[in-house]
Amino acid sequence: MLEELLSRLAGGSEEAFAALYRELRPLLWPMLERMLGTPEEAEEVFHDALLKLRAAAPGFDPGRARAATFARAIARNLALSRLRARRARPRRLEPDVQSLPAAATADPPPLEDRVRVRRALDRLDPLERRLLEAAFYQGFSHRELAERFGLPLGTAKSKLRRALIKLRKYLGGP
């Protein structure tokens, strides 16, 4: 569905833009609100992500990534840029489900996917897991990871890379 919308969006369809907004809001909003900490900032970044997605739609290659993954990456990168710009961190690592809007709790990933990811994360060394969580959920840069975990910069980078490679292997990726 999202792939088709991106294709139509690349052709300049305003209808596709509105449909993309409706499809992506429940997918991206919870992540953005968790990362940024406020609904106002989440909304700003969500809108920026949609505009960036519109501009990038002609270059989208469904052979390289799913449309949902493409959209998540754009939104996540914009949120990380915002966090770095204000030198702030998200309020919490895990979202408080009670405070999420109703749309944010719709369509969670399938249980089997969540279980697979949880098992893969549990197989990682505790330091590798903490590095991954700090980098991807809290938006820490490599330098900030090194400082936070008391590691040389090169060591922090290589441990994070090895953790990602292991995680991909555990999940059955290439």
Image (tube, rainbow, N blue to C red):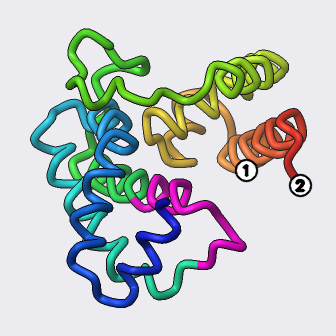
Which residue sits furthest left? 40
Q: Is residue 11 left or right of residue 108?
A: left
User: Mark 2 to mark 1: distance in Å?
Assistant: 25 Å
Task: Residue 89 in the image: state x and y as whole percent.
Answer: 31, 33
Q: Residue at x 45, y 59 (%)?
A: 71
33 lies left or right of 123: left
Q: Earlier in the sequence, mark 2 or mark 1?
A: 1
Question: Where 22 sits versus 102, above or below?
Answer: below
Q: Is residue 92 above or below residue 37?
A: above
Position above or below: 153 against 147:
below
Q: Quadrant of residue 163?
A: top right
Amino acid type for the residue under numbered disc 1: Gly
Residue toward you, 164 or 85: 164
Question: Residue at position x 29%, y 88% from top?
Answer: 12
Expressed as whole percent of the image width and height from the top left, the position of residue 148 reads 52, 29
* Amino acid under disc 2: Pro
Q: Nearer the viewer, residue 46 or 14?
A: 14
Judge depth for marks 2 and 1 and give the one in front.
Answer: 2
Residue 158 vs residue 137, the one in the foreground = 137
- The residue wearing badge 1 is 154
Q: Quadrant of residue 109?
A: top right
| Disc number placed over residue 24 in the picture, else none | none
**Residue located 43% across and 62% down the image:** 74
Q: Secondary structure at mark 1?
A: helix
Relative to 109, is 140 on the left or the right? Answer: left
| Label 2 SS | loop
Specify the quadrant that holds the C terminus.
Answer: bottom right
Picture coordinates of residue 53, whole percent (x, y): 37, 71
Segment colored magenta: 61-74
Name the residue carrying label 2: 174
